[in-house]
Structures are given as structure tokens and as C-alpha cells.
Amino acid sequence: MNRYNKVEFDFELWSWHGIEKDIMNKWCKRFGEEIVSSTLNGLREWLKNKPDFEETIEKGYAGNWVYFIWDCFERNENYKPKEREAKSNEG
């Protein structure tokens, strides 16, 4: 999923670093631009109230923010995988 990009969240600047065009394109292709944008912005706001969350990323996601972000995309209530969407349209 993330072999080359070192994604980080800067708790001083409240911004994401390392989300380059290649990974953003993959995320948008999988989840859609709207979900990617709203999730990243929502996480940014949420993390403002969680200054110690970096420790959770270290422990729960092996220090890899991409795994955490991907998990958040999948948990987004608006996300509907194309496979499930196609099946629901068939029935």
C-alpha cells in the first residue's frame, strides 16, 4: 500500500506531509476525491484535540500513518466499495 511515501502529521503546523501525487491518486481512485478530501480535513481537525495520538500510531499502526488514514477511509460512512455497489444495484 505504501512502499515509498513517508506520510506524517505535523502537530505544530497541523498539516500532512508526504502525501504526494501518486498516493493521492491511488486514494482518490479507490475512495473518491470527496471522501479523501473530507476525511483528511476531518482527521486534521480531530487530531488538533489529540496531541498524544502519535503514540497510538506508533503502537497500533507500526508508526505508519498511511495505515491509519486508509482505515479511516474505509470506516467513512459514505464509503461504498464498487463491488458492493454493483451487487446492490443488481438486486
Image: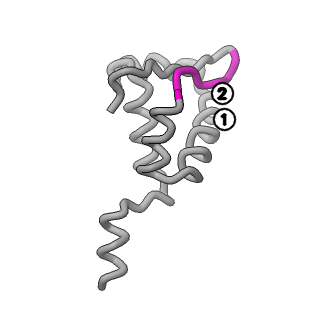
Q: Which residues are magenta?
A: 13-20
- The answer to if 19 sits in the magenta stretch is yes
Q: Amino acid at mark 2?
A: Lys
In which quadrant of the rendered image does the C terminus lie? bottom left
Please provide percent x and percent y for residue 87: 29, 75
Number of other residues with Cα within 10 Å of mark 2, as a class: few under 14, some 14 to 19, many 20 or more: few
Front residue of 46 and 17: 17
Please provide percent x and percent y for residue 28: 49, 47
Q: Write down the quadrant of residue 63 in the picture.
A: top left
Number of other residues with Cα within 10 Å of mark 1, as a class: few under 14, some 14 to 19, many 20 or more: few
In which quadrant of the rendered image does the N terminus lie? top left
For this view, does 51 lie left or right of residue 85? right
Tell me, for residue 45, which label it has, or none.
1
Tell me, for residue 48, which label it has, or none.
2
Q: Residue at x 35, y 28 (%)?
A: 2
Asked if the residues shown at circle 2 and circle 1 are in contact, with their CB atoms under 8 angstroms apart, the answer is yes
As measured in the structure, the alpha-carbon distance from the residue carrying label 2 to the one carrying label 1 is: 5 Å
Q: Residue at x 58, y 36 (%)?
A: 43
Compared to 88, does 30 lie above or below? above
- The answer to if 51 sits in the magenta stretch is no
Please provide percent x and percent y for residue 46: 61, 35
Q: Main secondary structure of the magenta part?
A: loop
